[in-house]
Amino acid sequence: MVWYQQFFVETGRSAALWALVGFLVTFTVTRGITRRIRAKKSAPVDEPAAGGGFSDIYIGGVHVHHQVWGILLVLLSGLLEFRFTPDAPWREILAALFGVGAALTLDEFALWFHLDDVYWGEEGRKSIDAILIGGALGAVLLMEASPVGSTQEEGVDTWLYTVLVVFHLATAGVSVVKGKLATGLIGIVVPIVALVGAIRLAKPSSVWARRRYSEKKMNRSHQRFDDDYLRRRERLRDLIGGTVQDDQAMQTPAAPGSQQPDDGPAAPARQPERPA
């Protein structure tokens, strides 16, 4: 394929391309499987299971989350790349494996952030945010953006270049403090995004707004990030990752073989003896 050779191989972007492809495909497949498993668990007993043959993985009675396989893939592919620095096609294969591992890990970001199984809970939405940020960073890196937005060109004084880089990173930091994590992280590689995020209003719940905004400006922030804004964000999250678990009473099933045997109805509680 001439276009692939011209636009990706000759420009050194083939590894970034396959890492992004592995990331996006793995996330899509993983969320599809977890949704089917969720539907299977939520289905009434008298109805056919909607989850097909998919089920959670248990090893030694312990539920092994897919982030475990993701961490192992990230470590393995990274170590092999650092040790051998292979040429094509092994470089692209390792990049794809890294993308697969990153997707599996970030898809359960909320679990290792909260140290709790909140995959389908409200806190689990952090995983969707992590996936969006990871995909956006992969896309801008594929476009050959520099990690600091620009590189020093010939004829530019070192002091001027340093000032520009510091200013750029400062705007990205301000965006994060204003409650715009995704804008700040993407702004590290796309300077204009960081600048816009630093100039615009902070979210009302951010440290910047709570410490620096007057009552009038805080009201403007609440109007900017109102219920309509939150509903649009939640619709996007629902579309990508599924809805929040409605049935909070549904408990995670025990591992196969770990259920207690059914010994029939429990014996009635012993009544205390009445004094003679």
Image (tube, rainbow, N blue to C red):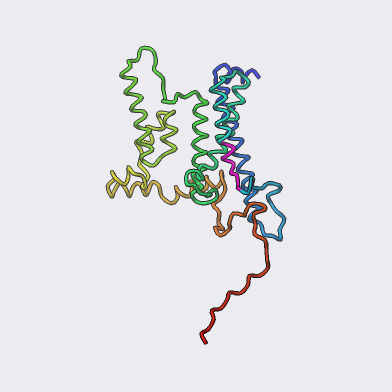
> Residue 107: which quarter of the image?
top right
Q: Nearer the viewer, residue 129 or 91?
A: 91
- Report the residue at 56% width, 19% height from top: 85
**Left or right: 110, with 45 as reference point:** left
- Report the residue at 44% width, 47% height from top: 229
- Farthest residue, direction front: 276
- Report the residue at 49% width, 28% height from top: 140
Residue 240 lies in the magenta-colored region: no
- Report the residue at 42% width, 25% height from top: 149
**Left or right: 212, with 234 as reference point:** left
The x and y percentages for residue 133 are 49, 36
> Residue 250: which quarter of the image?
bottom right
Which quadrant, please, contains the N terminus?
A: top right
The x and y percentages for residue 70 are 57, 36
Please tell me whether residue 55 is drawn above or below residue 200 in the rendered image: below
Please tell me whether residue 238 is drawn above or below residue 95 in the rendered image: below
Q: Nearer the viewer, residue 82 or 185?
A: 82
Please tell me whether residue 29 is drawn above or below residue 80 in the rendered image: below
How many labels sit on residues? 0
The x and y percentages for residue 77 are 57, 28
**Left or right: 144, with 30 as reference point:** left
The x and y percentages for residue 193 are 41, 32
Range drawn in magenta: 62-70
- Farthest residue, direction bottom: 276
Please tell me whether residue 152 is drawn above or below residue 229 in the rendered image: above
Residue 65 lies in the magenta-colored region: yes
